[in-house]
Amino acid sequence: MTRDRTPLLLAAILAAVVAGGLALPQWALFILTVACAQGLVVLGLMLLLRAGLVSFGQALYYCIGAYTAGGLARAFKIGDIFVQMFAGSALAALVALVLGFLLARYRGIFFGLLSLALSMILYGLIVKSEALGSTDGFNLLPSTLFGVRPSAAWVRYAVAVAAACVALGAAFLIHRFLNTPLGRLGPAIKDNEIRVEYMGASVRYAIHVNYVIAAALAGAGGALAASTVGHIDPEMAYWTTSGEFVFIAILAGTGSVIAPFLGALIFGAIHTIAYDVSPNTWQLSMGAALLLAIVFLPEGLWSLFVRRKAA
Amino acid sequence: MAAILDAQGLNKCFGAVTAAQGVTAAIERDSVVGLIGTNGAGKTTFINMITGYLKPDSGSIRYEGRDITALAPRQIARLGICRSFQIPQLYSSLSVYENMLMALGIMLHNAGRGGFFSSGRPGVPGHDAPAEEAADRILGRFGLSGYRDRNAQVLPGGVRKLLDIALTMAAKPRVLLLDEPTSGVSAEEKFGIMELIIQAVKAEGATVIFVEHDMEVVSRFAQRVLAFYDGRIIADAPPETVLRDAEVRRYVVGTVGRSTRA
């Protein structure tokens, strides 16, 4: 039996971020932090993808997380990034717990479109709400960490390290979950629900649990993104945001809990470079990148790191 | 012997088609019961009603005295009534070994073992070994070790069938329902598969109900035969009696005398 190297790898990545982050320019730290935020959402999406479900609505929970962070900052002057992430995650999980009773009944395109519709309802509600800043959204206070506000020179580094801690910690927990009997059920559900049910497990329960975990991760990601960018708007619930997450998930592959973060980082890098080189046609570059990934790496970027198994 | 499973007056209609009418049968503990009948006679409907896939329009099913008529398939499976399928139901993207791990994993999950906070490798209930060891042991017993790392999608028909049955047996059922365990299997393999199943069952102590079209298999392995025709049980007796029954010969076996060999 091969030894499980994922925890070690996660620790090594964290050490690399802590040490290497000191040498990175501010903009790179920003990309890294946003990649952590998006990677959290995609990590949840990966759980659903393993069970054969494509959610085009993770932006719902991303946005809930972001507006929870914004709400805490605005109403209670709470700028602590950890509190914001925890609250965003908890509220997203709570909403998913309720909506999951409906969504866990659906599969395939019905699941995808229903999740999309729910996120668009939130988008519509926020756009109509003056109190939530309507289409303009609103700005957040600068982030604090455990009540301390780092100086302007250090804030990007401190937030990036905090983000990496949360992201890699979440990856570790999900890795552990995927090694429990319930976590392992995903591919079985994707392959053959009938067999799963006749072995005595509840497919609906398993999907519901995965759905709530995915929402909790997306909520944390949303809060982190809100705090990092310092601004939130209803676009965060828009279907194109969900599409971006699906994009990253396909780019990354479902081979490892590290893949979503790698995917998000590469997505951020391509996005930044493409936008820098050609601001008007960056979408074209992104589309080309995805096409290349699908054609040459159908199992996602992570397949580059997996030794080919004998057929 | 006491009845472990007791079906009383089961009726089931699909529109104008009557798949079960007044099906009544008490299955004794540790017996091996064969279900015979032409296609559409109601054999699979009977199995589907016992395992909860179909709910009877009327009638009741009791398992060890408990009414299970309204339970869902997974609840019935947890009670120890497990089935295999006429068309093997496998996890086609996974290897044979992973298929088995999945079956054992569900047992761990249902027993509340191997959860998020537990450490080490918990033993699978009934197997007294961690899932990895138990999986290899079961694959060995069913002669599937040679296919361990093959993808379930690319297995030969007989092996698929065997894996389907092995997955079902891994759950340590008290009542095992096999829907045409030897269909799609070559004539040479048929008896081997049935022999394997019956041996494993004898070792574990379980009741077997199997649907079968091959009367030689039925007469060799079944202690009792229920003959179905048009949604009803037209004969219920040991195989040598049932296969000589005039009605059974006309409606089920055909008039060819060959099949009456006991």
Image (cartoon, grey):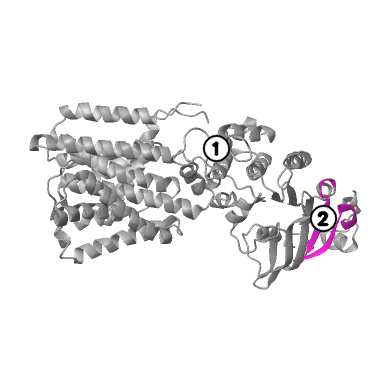
Which residue range is magenta in the image?
A: B220-242
Asked if residue A26 lies left or right of residue B244, the reply is: left
- Of residue B146 and residue B57, the one placed in the foreground of this image is B57
Other-residue count near label 1 (Cα within 10 Å), few / some / many at <14 / 14–19 / ≥20: many
Rendering quarter of residue A31? top left
Residue at position x 25%, y 49% in the image:
A222
x and y percent of residue A27 in the render?
A: 14, 37
- Identify the secondary structure beneath mark 1: helix
Asked if residue A69 lies left or right of residue A299, the reply is: left
x and y percent of residue A107 in the render?
A: 45, 56
Task: Report the disc number at residue B225.
Answer: 2
- Of residue B98 and residue A80, the one placed in the foreground of this image is A80
x and y percent of residue A146 in the render?
A: 19, 41
Question: Can you see residue A212?
Answer: yes
Marks 2 and 1, Cα distance to the nearest angstrom?
Answer: 36 Å
Task: Report the disc number at residue B98.
Answer: 1
Residue at position x 16%, y 52% in the image:
A73
x and y percent of residue B156 in the render?
A: 65, 39
Q: Does the magenta stretch include residue B235?
A: yes
Other-residue count near label 2 (Cα within 10 Å), few / some / many at <14 / 14–19 / ≥20: many
Tag 2: amino acid: Val
Closer to the chain start, of discs 2 and 1, is 1
